[in-house]
Image (cartoon, helix red, strand yellow):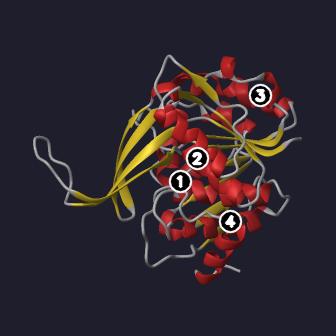
Amino acid sequence: MKYDIIALGELNVDLILNQIDGAPEVGKEKFCQDMILTLGSSTAIFAANAAALGTKVAFCGMVGRDGFGDLVETSLQKKGVDTTYLIRQNKWATGATICLNYNEDRANVTYQGAMDHLSLADIPEELFGAGKHLHISSIFMQTGLKKDIVAILTKAKAAGMTTSLDTQWDPNERWDLDYTKVLPLIDIFLPNEKELCCLTGAASVEEAVAKIRPYMNNAVIKWGNKGSLLIKKDGTEVMLKPFLNTHVVDAIGAGDSFNSGFLSRFVAGDSLETCQRYGNMTGAVNTTAAGGTGAFTSREEVEKKGAELGWN
């Protein structure tokens, strides 16, 4: 197989506003002290950071033939992500997210654009089986992919690929994904605790885990500054404390960076416990620089920063 991981899904730019003078108010103007225009989207941040860790990554997604599309393509390439499967078209503009960043939390407004129209019909047949692993994220932001997700995962599994899914938040808060059909096709399920509870309609993580257990293979629940919970197919559970960065620049992409660390070790054949520990480390390192990819220059540099946070 040519690639370790093929990332499939949404692509957009992020316009990140930092040091904002309070929350927005309709009819009023607010100032911020810092602005960054950078590669955005959960799946793209994941792909860029996994590539920076030395994993062979290709991306399949849809963008417009516009300046933002150029920024997305060149940013992925500079991070070492193969863009052979990138789809450039004239009908829809490239997506964009305005991100109002407040320390470890944020408020986003997204224009979906081209990424909302990507579907199974757009995916080249040769992609299935071209990589060891297929990763999908932000499924609720992508109408076309959500509609076809069972068919996509079925084709990936038939081609011998392992799979992972990070649902991310549902902006419409309908949570209309049938996890009873999707989870059996997923090798590594990667929600955070809020997303898992919303997806299952559960009042607690414990209740949510009980609901997904009959259908899941392996799951890792990201729990922010509490760490992560690994749940293996055999029923084993491992709660791992975080490697906390006490000087957070921002937490944008921390969950995606966890995914990149976990899955980079997963495709290398490491144990799930090792993958979890590495994911906790890369999630923490993410918060040491601005934007979702700023801290990921090389595997050596990430591991050096991780060691400073207590990882070894």
Residue wearing tag 4: 298
User: Do the numbered discs 2 and 1 sit on residues whose CB atoms are within 8 Å?
Assistant: no
| Distance of label 4 from label 1 (alpha carbons) | 26 Å
Could you say where residue 279 lies in the image, as x and y percent from the top left? 65, 64
Relative to 186, say whether 93 is above or below. above
SS label for mark 2: helix
Relative to 39, say whether 60 is above or below. above
Could you say where residue 142 lies in the image, as x and y percent from the top left? 53, 29
Relative to 226, say whether 182 is above or below. above
Numbered label attached to residue 75: 2
Numbered label attached to residue 154: 3
Does residue 180 appear anywhere in the picture? yes
Residue wearing tag 1: 192
| Distance of label 3 from label 4 (alpha carbons) | 34 Å
Could you say where residue 71 lies in the image, as x and y percent from the top left? 52, 41
Identify the residue at horizontal 48%, vertical 29% (top origin): 66
Identify the residue at horizontal 52%, vertical 43% (top origin): 41
Q: Amino acid at mark 1?
A: Asn
First in sequence: mark 3 vs mark 1: 3
First in sequence: mark 3 vs mark 4: 3
Q: Amino acid at mark 4?
A: Ser
3 or 4: mark nearer the eye: 4
